[in-house]
Amino acid sequence: MTEQNTRLGIWLMIATTFVFSVQDGISRHLAGEYNVFMVVMIRFWFFAAFVMAMATRNEGGLRAAVRSRYPALQVTRGLLLAAEVCVMVVAFVRLGLVESHAVFTCYPLLVAALSGPVLGEKVGWRRWTAIGIGFVGVLIILQPGVAVFSPAALIPLLSAFMFAMYGLLTRYVARGDAASVSFFWTGAVGAAAMTPLGLWFWEPMTLPDWGWMAALCCTAAFAHWLLIRAYEVAEASAVQPFAYLQLVFASSIGILLFGERLETNVALGAAVVVCAGLFTLWRQRLKARAA
């Protein structure tokens, strides 16, 4: 991998985090006005159409995209992601973008902690120490035992756990399925799962909000395309640390557009979580190089 490609991959990852943050801001607005299931359903409809269009352009077309060595796990992945999106959007409405993303940043630590039981990977004492420190940061954000603890603060933590499991299962099926296959199953299963729920809770939407819905669908597809391109031109270990910029971008949108506040405990806890996460990524990169 050349330095130029790595640099391009970094810029693509930065662009990815920015577009995902814009998507989160739009989701927060729409879910504050309409049912979460309906909003997520329409988003997955567009996502499914996007992955099908991409599949038809690849060698073998839709038939190759459907063919999986792990169909049950692919269905589980799709259901996990659809559920995780719903949970996280609820967190945006209940807690705001700042606090939700501050807690959600712990998901790489959950991936590291669960990689042993799920993938059979060895996690050394240094990474376990970093994982422990990271969850101290989460406790700083949540402040259990201080004043009145809000159970809603656990919503983004649940979302982080679900996304970590989705990521681990994605790594597992990558042993036998191409990325294009996993991408197709993610969109198709998510759309199929969300359609009954979304249609049941369907409600009329104003014309301006249909414009925001179109923007949500386009940003979701564009962000996924940017992410794919980032991983195509650079090693994942080189660009992954820049994914933490989504915390910065999303928090900025929350503060500037939704009037949210950055509390001291949230800023301090998020800093601890990010530092711990960066350390685990660094250790993972060293381990990969040694192997």
Image (spheres, rainbow, N blue to C red):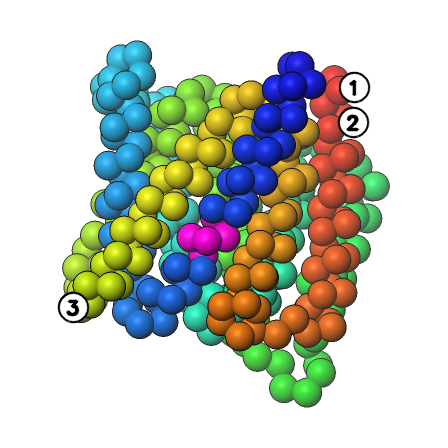
Q: Residue at x 57, y 36 (%)?
A: 13
Q: List the residue tagged with mark 2.
A: 286
Q: List the residue tagged with mark 1.
A: 290
Image quadrant occupied by the N terminus? top right
Q: How many numbered marks does the figure carry? A: 3
Judge left or right: residue 17 versus residue 80: right
**The disc label shown at residue 161, or none:** none
Q: Residues within 10 Å of mark 3 (few under 14, many from 20)?
A: few
In this rendering, the answer to whether 257 lies above or below 271 is below
Q: List the residue tagged with mark 3.
A: 204
- Mark 3 or 1: in front is 3
Q: Amino acid at mark 2?
A: Leu
Q: Amino acid at mark 1?
A: Ala
Q: Main secondary structure of the magenta part?
A: helix
- Label 3 to label 1: alpha-carbon separation: 57 Å
Image quadrant occupied by the C terminus? top right
Give coordinates of residue 149: x percent, y percent: 62, 81
Q: Residues within 10 Å of mark 2 (few under 14, many from 20)?
A: few
In this rendering, the answer to whether 265 lies above or below 275 is below
Q: Residue at x 24, y 45 (%)?
A: 45
Q: Residue at x 47, y 33 (%)?
A: 226
Identify the secondary structure beneath mark 3.
loop
Residue farthest toward the top in the current orientation of the protein: 59
Judge left or right: residue 288 versus residue 219: right
Judge left or right: residue 237 versus residue 287: left
Q: Which residues are magenta?
A: 20-24
Of mark 3 and mark 1, the one earlier in the sequence is: 3
Of mark 2 and mark 3, the one earlier in the sequence is: 3
- Hey, which quadrant is residue 196 in on the image? bottom left
- Label 2 to label 3: alpha-carbon separation: 53 Å
- Mark 2 or 3: in front is 3
Contact flag, marks 2 and 1 (Cβ < 8 Å): yes
